[in-house]
Amino acid sequence: MALEQKTVSTFKQILKIEGISKSFVKDGKKVQVLEDVSFEAREGSFVSIIGPSGCGKTTLLRIIDGLVKPDSGKVLFNGKPVTSPPPKMGFVFQQFGLLPWRTVRKNVEFGLELRGVNPEEKKKIAEGYIKLVGLEGFENHYPHELSGGMQQRVGLARALAIDPDVLLMDEPFASLDMQTRELFQRELLKIVKGALPKTTLFVTHNIDEAIYLSDEIVLMTARPGKVYEIIKVDLPQERWKEDIRAHPEFIRLRQKIWKFLESQIIEKEMGENESGKA
Amino acid sequence: MSASIVNRYRYPFLFLTIIVFVAVWWVVAKIVNDPYALAGPVSTAKAYYQLFAQSSLRNLFITSIESTLLSIFLGFVLAVAIGIPVGIFMGRYLVVDYLVDPWINIWYSIPAIAFVPLVMNWAGLTSISALIVSFLIAVFSIIINVYTGVKNVSASLVEPAIAFGISKRALYTKVILPASTPNIMVGLRLGITRAIEGVIVAEMVFSVVGLGGMIFDTADKLEMSLTIALVIVISLISIALNYLMKYLDHKVVFWKESSALKRG
Ligand SMILES: Nc1ncnc2c1ncn2[C@@H]1O[C@H](COP(=O)(O)OP(=O)(O)OP(=O)(O)O)[C@@H](O)[C@H]1O
Ligand SMILES: [Mg+2]
């Protein structure tokens, strides 16, 4: 039964990003941020986006969620072009974006409330997700009473509560220490690959994190951000069950991505030096 | 000195400063030795006795307080009722902001007393005029702060709401307005101070209504101890209203991180 489901979903491309370009005008000058970005995500897969700072990763997620319009190209979600935030997409923001005057529960209920879910059901659903992210007992706390990691978990619960098919996550673990971070990575995988299957798009700067979590990694170049390569991560599923970080394939991928990122940073700095001389 | 010690002895300290103040006042009054220039604490205390013991004076005192408080209250409530919607409107529509902003700033910089002769011509030497003056000078501090708040709501609060598909209306009621409450409360706190100022200034010029009028009248009759007694009453009213607003502020914006900042 489970196997059957898997083979069916393997073929379905739930998300198609086709030729996205985007520029901003800054101080009267046009800055090209994204250039002809294309990739796809299979239903139920975990795709990480990794690239140097400022290459347009956050902008790309915003475009995928319909929060920002691209200059050209389109995003197809279940075959339909995205023009405004689709109800079946959840967004976990880098700066949490919790409403500080609402308790944890009220924050998690926020999306449900906007969709007119009745109060009893709303409360029940919210409590379920609060438990899932391990914040039981903190329902009536306010964001300023929580640590950064706890706030991030509220942000995750809030995005999961609307039961999205696609989860967009923008450097969600950046503010966590190493141990907590690895714990969160494992818990996230258990959720999106187990308890509540989702298609996940995950932006990160952390190479190990990308390899550990992903089925595919989209490598982006420095600004203007282009897709350099899409790497398939050929590691066993249910990665939380073994010490995957010692796997030879893991080490090979880490080296490969590290080399690429290094070249991008060096290239960028040389470029800046040249323009500085001119 | 550590903050905990300061906190523990906060009220004894306050009491001590009051004693010192009264003592200095007493000494200065003794040195000046002219009851028409400066009444001392003892004669001021006697003036309070007079205010409560003499029935005609007492009646005047009570009606004056009533009139002053009512003018402040109505002027302030009117300023809030008009200032908050106008502030939101300005924050919402950039065009309105550009058109109205310079006018608001010009108006805001006019001192309260400049309105008094104008308003006097509209509504006479009445408490209604005092109310209008207090409204006119309170409303702009409220408008300015409300629209500053609305304009500066962080994108990091608005964006998640939009990602959830929030409606235009709900964006205002559920995100932008609550997020602006710290600024709105600043506006209200400034507004109440200005409303009090407006009423007293107007009453003093009219010299026939309210506590301001009584102060002017007693000073005119060279009853310095009564004048000082009444000025103290006005200060107490002002302190009480400011405390009330401060209390409201802490109740409403309990979630603001900066309000939890510790001072040394
Ligand atoms: N609304 C905007 N207006 C103007 N410029 C913008 C806007 N949003 C983003 N940019 C610019 O686009 C570029 C890419 O920004 P973006 O936040 O997408 O990068 P990023 O890859 O997410 O970076 P980081 O890894 O540091 O988070 C930056 O140079 C930024 O200044
Ligand atoms: Mg970013």
Image (tube, coloured by chain):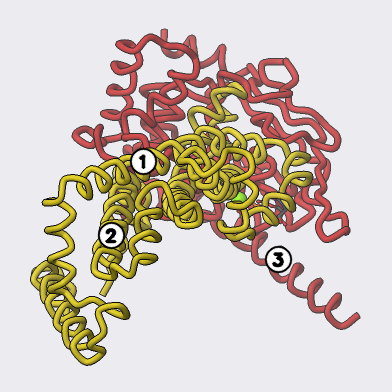
Chain colours: A red, B yellow
* Label of residue B67 in the image: 1
Give the mark toward the camera: 3 or 1: 1
Q: Residue at x 34, y 37 (%)?
A: A187
Q: CA distance from mark 3 to mark 1?
A: 78 Å
Give the image location of residue A39, x and y in percent.
72, 34
Q: CA distance from mark 2 to mark 1?
A: 14 Å
Quarter of image, res B224: bottom left
* Label of residue B108 in the image: none
Do the residues at discs 2 and 1 belong to one chain? Answer: yes
Give the image location of residue B88, x and y in percent.
60, 36
- Which element is circle 3 on? helix
Give the image location of residue B15, x and y in percent.
11, 71
Vertical position of residue B229 compared to residue A92: above or below: below
Residue kind at label 2, given as amino acid type: Leu
Residue kind at label 1, given as amino acid type: Ser
Give the mark toward the camera: 2 or 3: 2
Q: CA distance from mark 2 to mark 3?
A: 78 Å
Residue of label 3: A263
Do the residues at discs 3 and 1 belong to one chain? Answer: no
Which sits in the foreground, B75 or A87? B75
Q: Say whether residue B53 is left or right of residue A124.
A: left
Vertical position of residue A36 compared to residue B262: above or below: above
